[in-house]
Amino acid sequence: MSVSRRILIASAVTAATIGRRAAWAAGDDAPPTVLQLGKRTLEVNGKAASVYGIHQPDGTNGIAISVGQPFRVRVENQIDAPSLIHWHGLTPPWRQDGVPEISGPPIASGSGADYDFPLRFGGTFWMHSHQGLQEQLLMSAPLIIHGDRDEPGRQEIVLMLHDFSFTSPDEIFAALRKPRKMAGMSGMKMPAKPGAGPDLNDVAYDAFLANDRTLADPEVVKVEPGGRVLLRVINGSAMSNFHLDLGALDGELIAVDGFRVTPITARRFPIAVAQRLDIRITLPRGAAAHPVLAVLEGAERRTGIVLAAGGAAVARIADAAAAPSPALSLDLERRLRSVTPLPARKADRVHKIDLTGDMMTYAWSINNVPWTPDVPPLPVTAGERVELVITNKTAMPHPMHLHGHEFQVVEIDGVRFAGAVRDTVLVPPNGRVVVAFDANNPGWWAFHCHLLYHLAAGMFTTFRYT
Ligand SMILES: [Cu+2]
């Protein structure tokens, strides 16, 4: 770790944290968990795929900790490029948020950085690189915080989804940015004609992964007949929204993006890029294999894992459904009700956020301004209740993510309600979603579309307050 990096991180921690650091030396507290950013090889469609990963030295993928502990982590960058990891959904001090040039500089190859902050809530979160296009190469991992919602004796299953291409992210982005030259290129779709309905899935992926595997060789999780499981689903895709499909199983959705909702029972649930679903399932008695699938929105393609109860044989599952799925809608979002809503309060400040841009030029922006570091932050004052009126003026859906704060969905298409508390909300083409948050974590915070190439093209802005 370079000296300057060490000083920067040290200056960002509080006096209380420094007090705790002294305590580890005395042995009364746990050492940090080390997370190593590395390269690894997967087999995808019978071919070797070189991707990144975030693992502990013992091979554990990501991290699972308890809400009673501080988030105390050391990130070691073992790839040959700078990187920086964002703790998606957590509310750290802003200097530890992991967004290059906003919260701080990236970690140089061969260096490390330390993180230490209190956790405010339990739930299903994830971590991913916010540096360049590394997220497309699977620089991401689960971040599970155990809390009061955990039930002893209930099996937990993490299902992390990814989209995968053998084409490099730089080539994918270059091809998207030159749409008129795409006709002769493999791997890219032609842009839809303006006015031809929603544009979905603008990258043609080679595979969709569930816990790094395709349905040709899916993960098989042993479960007990009649047993109770908690499925923690994380959409870690760069660009792909899915419908989670439980087949004949009933799932009880109990939390979205880590925050509890009044339970809703169903067999299919939408999950946009960066969102999470916590679903309780009681398995039927008797030996059976239960596929848990994720079907790409607007398409037949799918991935998934298999829950195998009582030693049941697992049959091959086709990687295409019989018919294309619909586009994601806000039908479920409208029905979600937070168990822990924000206190009722009138907004002190309202920001109008228009999602702008177009597919033909692949120019994406907020309020018609594509992000550069010179774009002034949107003003907020500490202590305010802030509402963001997000209007999608484009033909593509955009999953919008706010850093450093949880927000509550309070209005969809003009109908006011006390919806889910979460950190990422899908705004469909021509849709209007209002979210509210309390400005209770001073700093400089990103607010952006979580579709990786939209973010890279400029659908990104910031808030800043002291
Ligand atoms: Cu977008």
Image (cartoon, helix red, strand yellow):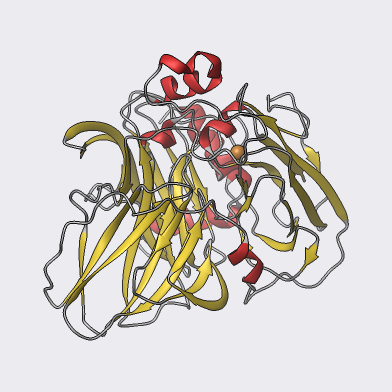
Q: Position of residue 433 (x, y in %)?
A: 73, 54
Q: Quadrant of residue 290?
A: bottom left
Q: Is residue 422 above or below residue 136?
A: below
Nearer-the-camera pick, 159 or 14 = 159
**Which residue is painted at 41% across and 50% down in the image?**
73
Nearer-the-camera pick, 152 or 160 = 160
- The N terminus appears in which quarter of the rendering? top left
Ligand 1, what quadrant? Answer: top right
Q: Quadrant of residue 99?
A: top right
Q: Position of residue 242 (x, y in %)?
A: 45, 52
Nearer-the-camera pick, 144 or 324 = 324
Q: Position of residue 148 (x, y in %)?
A: 48, 78
**Which residue is painted at 34% across and 54% down in the image?**
322
Q: Position of residue 299 (x, y in %)?
A: 43, 46
Residue 31 visible? The answer is no
How many marks on residues? Answer: 0
Direction from residue 433 to residue 289 in the image, left or right = left
Q: Is residue 37 above or below residue 384?
A: above
Q: Is residue 437 above or below residue 445?
A: below
